[in-house]
Image (tube, helix red, strand yellow):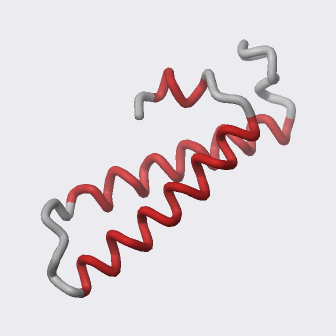
Amino acid sequence: MRKSELTEMTVSELATKLQDDLESLQNFRFQKALQQLENPIQIKHVKKEIAHVKTLLKEYELGIRTEGGGNS
């Protein structure tokens, strides 16, 4: 998912996205352990997306970013 798409999401959507990404990461790690993962780079991309979502959630928490869609 692109950064611009993530920044347009609301807090509840970001929380849902974070849960989905964490589940995906767990599945990818399980597949890697069983040597069934076709593209190991997927793990790297999911980890980066998780970090970005967590950063956005923290910005909302600290008041740096508002629900209105714009930065302060």
Residue 14, placed above or below residue 45 = above
Q: Position of residue 61 (x, y in %)?
A: 84, 41
- Residue at 54 percent of width and 43 percent of height: 52
Q: Position of residue 5 (x, y in %)?
A: 51, 24
- Residue at 50 percent of width and 21 percent of height: 4
Residue 71, placed above or below residue 18 = above
Quadrant showing the N terminus: top left
Q: Quadrant of residue 9?
A: top right
Count of picture labels: 0
Residue 72, placed above or below residue 18 = above
- Residue at 38 percent of width and 72 percent of height: 27
Relative placement, left or right, of 11 versus 4 is right
Relative placement, left or right, of 42 versus 67 is left
Q: Quadrant of residue 14?
A: top right
Q: In front here: 39 or 51?
A: 39
Q: Position of residue 32 (x, y in %)?
A: 24, 78
Q: Position of residue 72 (x, y in %)?
A: 79, 15
Relative placement, left or right, of 22 versus 9 is left
